[in-house]
Amino acid sequence: MLEIAPSVLAAHPLYVARDVKRLVDAGIKVLHLDIMDGHFVPNISFGPAMVSSLSKEFPGIELDVHLMLAEPEKYTDTFMKAGAHSITIHSEISADLLPILMSIKRAGIKAGLSVKPGTQIDRISSYLDLIDLVLVMSVEPGFGGQKLIPDTLPKISLLRERGFTGTISVDGGVNLENSREVLSYGANRLVMGTAAFTAEDPKALFDQLLST
Ligand code: DX5
Ligand code: ZN
């Protein structure tokens, strides 16, 4: 079942609740929260206070937290307490992935792994039986508003060929024009920042995407 996950990074920083409510009213059930530390990626976004505020303001919405952090192991508990329903860490970090993923699963939270454009699926193959979600970055992580890199998409079908039946989410430069192609590879969640938050008529956009 296809899910659209607007990335709050693209909301107006002074009017996040207003912008998110507009998309929730348009039928959104999942929010994507890009947490950036200025080390793993050359940008800093927002922290656990944003997650807990959104959790209180929009209790029925699934919070899909994407940790673009060099040391996510230091913050998983904090984001779980803040209300994250899923936590995705990057496969490129230096720490051992298994204990971090196990700690997320033990807490009853969905665990995800993300691969940057230059990272091959082999890097996460041994975790596919454990994780609930793979986040395929279709741009270099760090900034919204970039152009989708088509060469990242074959990773999706490779994951399906290797028997991964969990959520495959694509993050970066996704819009109405390229969504059909992205879905044709086997993705079932589209992270959309700019396309979702700048849409004139978000409900029409989501209806069109969900009828793809
Ligand atoms: C990159 C971010 C962006 C964001 C989506 O690190 O993760 O990909 O969520 O932004 P758009 O949809 O504007 O590319
Ligand atoms: Zn993201």
Image (cartoon, helix red, strand yellow):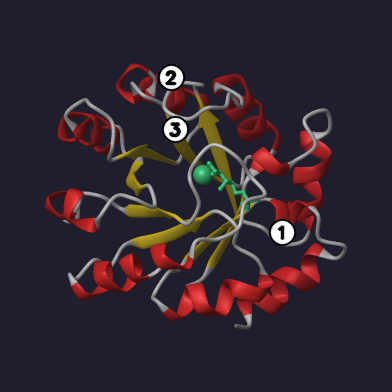
When asked about the image quadrant of residue 207, the answer is bottom right
Query: Looking at the image, is mark 3 or mark 2 nearer the viewer?
Result: 3
Provide the secondary structure element on which disc 3 rests. strand
First in sequence: mark 3 vs mark 2? 3
Residue name at image x 51 percent, y 71 percent: 2
Q: Residues within 10 Å of mark 3 (few under 14, many from 20)?
A: many
Q: CA separation, marks 1 and 3?
A: 21 Å
Whole-percent x, y for residue 160 in the image: 26, 72
Mark 2 lies on residue: 78
Q: CA separation, marks 2 and 1?
A: 30 Å
Q: Nearer the viewer, residue 128 or 122?
A: 122
First in sequence: mark 1 vs mark 3? 3
Mark 1 lies on residue: 195
Q: Marks 1 and 3: CB-CB under 8 Å?
A: no
Whole-percent x, y for residue 38 in the image: 51, 21
Residue name at image x 59 percent, y 26 percent: 52
* Ligand 1 is within 8 Å of the C-beta of the residue at disc 1: yes
The amino acid at mark 3 is: Met
Whole-percent x, y for residue 194 in the image: 71, 52
Mark 3 lies on residue: 68
The amino acid at mark 1 is: Ala
Relative to 212, say whether 198 is above or below.
Answer: above
The quadrant the C terminus occupies is: bottom right
Residue name at image x 28 percent, y 31 percent: 93
